[in-house]
Structure formats: C-alpha cells, structure tokens
Amino acid sequence: MGLFDSLFRSSEVLGIARETLEFALQASEQTHPDEYMGMLRGTEAREVGLDRDGLVITDVLVIPGTESNSVSATVKTNMIPNDNKSLGSVHSHPNGALRPSKADLATFTRGDVHIIIGAPYDWGDWKAFDSDGQPTELNVLDVDLPDDEEFFHFDQHDIDAELREDEFDRGRRW
Ligand SMILES: [Zn+2]
C-alpha cells in the first residue's frame, strides 16, 4: 500500500458510534418541534478500539448561535470550526420526512456525511446522505468511546448521560 493509499484510507468514514447516534436521536427529540442541527466530528478508528484505518463519527458539535424553528436551522457559518475532524452534519426534520430539502442540498457540499433524523425519533428514524444528497450506507459501530469531557459539548452532558444509562444497558461507565 502506497503513501497515497494510506492517506486516503485514513480519511475514510467507517461509520458512526452507536452512542453518538443515540445521542443525536435523543437531542432531536428534545429539540422538537424545532429543528436540531449539529456538525459531525470524527475520531481515528484505532483510538476507539478498531483494528483498521479510517474515521468513526463520535461527536456532535452544536455551533454556537444556531437558531432553529420547526422548518429550518440557521448556522452561523463563521462559527464552524475549521478543522479536519469535521465530517458533515446532522439535523432533524420535525415533520418526519427523511429526505433532504433543496436548502439541505445546498449545505451538503460541506462534508461527506449528512444525517437527517425525523420525528418520532425512534431508532430507525434516520437516513444518511452523501454530499450530492444521495442516500448512503452508514454503519452503526459498537466502539469504546474515550472518556473525554469534550466528547459531548453540552451543559446537560451529565444529565443526558444518566438518562441514557437508564434507557440503554450498554455496559459503559459514565
Ligand atoms: Zn433539512
């Protein structure tokens, strides 16, 4: 495998951590009837215990100043961190439609993976799209997320974590 192969492979998105997806579903439900919107960030697969190159979506970052209502969420683009861990976006459709709007398609050019979560926000109520707005496969991965205070960028981190621990017995220490 040549240098370029390894460079490209290391940026491949392998999937999303199960906990991260659960978190985004729950956050979308809590934000209802407004739209939830966040940026997806990744961690090297080897850092979360996978024996292969690539990136795993482990993080949802809500951009400060994001304003949302029932039909749209407006992100202040100058607040989006300019770092190479940004892999795409996640947002909710309170009307339940699991397809991108025209406005969504215009924003999907930024990043590789875009998740739309729809009401009622149950486990299957989401779809992933590529930067062209085409449905794409996104694996849900059972990985060991680092015990990192920065993992959730939310003040309600501890409360949410406890709620999740009650709902999902995933054998993880919080
Ligand atoms: Zn949308």
Image: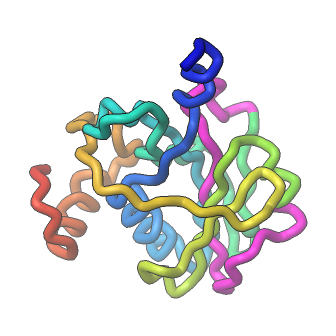
Is residue 11 shown left or right of residue 68?
Answer: left
At horizontal 66% and vertical 62% (from top left) the residue drawn is 136
At horizontal 62% and vertical 27% (from top left) the residue drawn is 8
At horizontal 59% and vertical 12% (from top left) the residue drawn is 3
Residue 6 found in image quarter? top right
- The region drawn magenta spans 78-104
- Judge whether 80 appears above or below 40 on screen: above
Q: In this rendered view, identify the residue nearer to me: 115 or 27.
A: 115
Q: In this rendered view, identify the residue nearer to me: 70 or 24.
A: 24
- Judge whether 53 appears above or below 160 on screen: above
Residue 170 found in image quarter? bottom left
Image quadrant, ligand 1: bottom right
Is residue 3 shown left or right of residue 145?
Answer: right
Is residue 54 shown left or right of residue 137?
Answer: left
Residue lying furthest front: 1
Residue 29: horizontal and vertical position, in percent? 47, 76
Is residue 45 shown left or right of residue 96?
Answer: left
Residue 47: horizontal and vertical position, in percent? 31, 31
